[in-house]
Amino acid sequence: MSSSLETEIRPMLACLTTQVFDSPKHIFEAKWDGIRCMAYLSEEGTRLLDRTGDDISGRYPELLSLHRQINTASEVVLDGEIIVSISGKPDARALARRNQSDERTSAVLARSQPALFIAFDVLRTDGRLLTRFPLLERKDMLCRMVQQGNHLVLGTWIDERGSAFFKKINHLGLHGVVAKEKSSQYLPGQRSALWLKILKTKVQDCVVCGFTEGQGRRAGLLGSLVLGTYRGSSLLHVGQVGSGFDNETLAALHAKLVQRESPICPFAEMPRTARPTHWLRPELVAEVQYIEWTPDLKLRGPRFLSLRKDKPVQECEIEEMELLQNYGTSDHSLGSS
């Protein structure tokens, strides 16, 4: 691709809040629980990068013609999400299969489980950086330049009425909403309270630090994953998760884990586990649903959702803690909602 698109733009990230609200200063977008993706489109073709900067174009061959759906510019950088829809709803497991497949498998899945790119921002056009423009101006540019089609659509959003929109999103079975200040500039690579994600269920990204040995039907596989999050440069033990695995996931996950076994515990302090534990090099990120944080910073009611290939392990921090620090209210309970 031409040089004007060579400089990569890291995605801007939202902070987490538990409060649903209305605000004349915000718009509210649907959160699709997809793969965050920066789409680099030009007359030469389409290039797709995940939030770590890895090129994932080969996993989604059906999206490689997105550049043909741009009307008013020859070169564009879009921010959005990739989803896979099953029976009319985003399917996280189907998406995980797509994101972990090789090119041969991707070509087959592209026909049976095609992906969709949902665009919600435009960051550069014909070499002109747009990140300093207010959000609503960027939205207007995006609407004028994108020709929606089978594999590229614009994200759904509503003005001011966050509470009603959240109820609608909840009814549709989607993941949540993102509140964005209308005047917000785009801050590449930064997590900012200018954007707030409000989730239907609480989700935490954790580093997979070990696994306990399985018993009964899981003999020879894993019983639970030992989870951690970063606090500064150190890993903090935040509990174990043993639910949310089907048989296919258990076998595939166990194969990934044994390749990363290490004699060294990655935690500064050895956590207590009920079963024999195999420690791992901290290289994998697990997306985990939970009910709340306990007072000693453990996940209550955790359930495994998927592995994330698009997030660096160093970014796995307690998101609710970060939000409280942003607002200067760190004396409040982490488990409050």
Image (cartoon, rainbow, N blue to C red):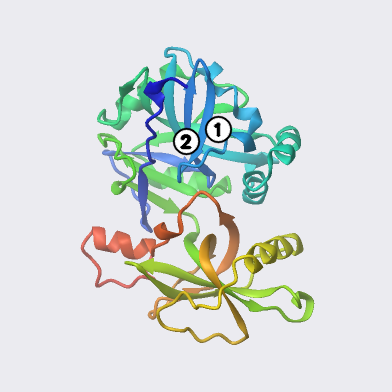
For the residue pair 198 and 283, the one nearer the viewer reads as: 283
For the residue pair 268 and 322, the one nearer the viewer reads as: 268
Residue plotted at (64% across, 48% down): 100
Amino acid type at image mark 2: Gly
Question: In the image, 301: left or right of 4?
Answer: right
Quarter location, residue 115? top right
Q: Which residue is mark 1?
A: 117
Question: In the image, 265: left or right of 296?
Answer: right
Compared with 319, 162 (above or below) is: above
Residue plotted at (49% across, 17% down): 70
Q: Residue furthest left?
A: 328
Q: Are marks 1 and 2 in contact (CB under 8 Å)?
A: yes
Mark number displayed over residue 80:
2
Residue 78 appearing in the image: yes
Residue plotted at (59% across, 64% down): 304
Quarter location, residue 179? top left
Whole-percent x and y of residue 230?
39, 67
Whole-percent x and y of residue 235?
41, 71
Secondary element type, mark 2 = strand
Quarter location, residue 150? top right
Secondary element type, mark 1 = strand
